[in-house]
Amino acid sequence: MRVLLIEDDERLTEALAASLRSEGYAVDIAPCAEDGRWMATEVPYDAIVLDVGLPDGDGIDLCGSLRDSGVWAPILILTAHAEIGDRVRGLDAGADDYLAKPFSLEELIARLRALLRRGQAERPTILLVGAMQLDPATRRVSIDGDVLPIAGRAFAILELLARRQGQLVSREEITEHVWDWAWEGASNVIDVHVSAIRATLRSSPRAPAIETVRGAGFILRAADGGGPGE
């Protein structure tokens, strides 16, 4: 999943980004409101972590502006102010949650997981594709109770395919959701991950299959909804 972090404190940004990446998230960083506004409207982020005190504007005003622009990714606001009035102002502007500094990185990640679970209307708690269950919160994939060793980028790719099961997901969409701006990986890296996912899924006869549409992308189909992947 891809997260936008709008924060000007370099030390906090580095710590947050490192923690989120260690959990398997792709993280883009915007150090100011102007950059954050542009990035949030250009990329379909899965969640946004937004600091109130930005050098070129108020984070709560930015939150309201993003909502007015049709950006509906879950927004978690960070602030040094814990007053009720500030919390109400943030929630009224369209924020989904509010975390006062100082906070633990573990709490932030837990709240972010909760937002991603709840998220937008198309985000069910557990994703079902035939017999396969994928839990975005615990990052666990199982079939008939057997947990499959799918993690990191491979999990993020499978999650995206599961959210769009039966539909074509382009390579460009996978790149946008799974990697950040700084990514300059090999051109075949998506195929390598998809091949690894297929190899793991083949351990179960009831696993869904990933179909390759040459030159376009991939489709995830339940075991009874399409042929085996290539």
Image (tube, rainbow, N blue to C red):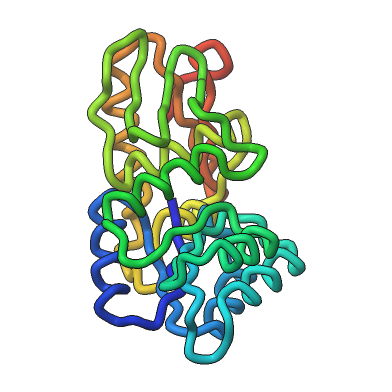
| Residue at 55%, 82% in the rendered image | 33
Q: Position of residue 177 (x, y in %)?
A: 48, 55
Q: Quadrant of the C terminus?
A: top left
Of 227 and 3, nearer the camera is 3
Of 94 and 14, nearer the camera is 94
| Residue at 51%, 32% in the rendered image | 162
Q: Position of residue 212 (x, y in %)?
A: 49, 37
Q: Position of residue 157 (x, y in %)?
A: 41, 43
Q: Is residue 115 above or below residue 18?
A: above
State the count of labels: 0
Of 57 and 19, nearer the camera is 57
Q: Is residue 189 above or below residue 156?
A: below
| Among the 4 quarters of the image, the one containing residue 131 | top left
Q: Is residue 191 above or below residue 50?
A: above
Of 48 and 21, nearer the camera is 48
Q: Is residue 118 left or right of residue 201?
A: right
| Residue at 42%, 35% in the rendered image | 136
Q: Is residue 182 left or right of residue 165?
A: left
Q: Position of residue 21 (x, y in %)?
A: 28, 57
| Among the 4 quarters of the image, the one containing residue 144 | top left
| Residue at 41%, 10% in the rendered image | 206
Residue at far bottom of view: 56
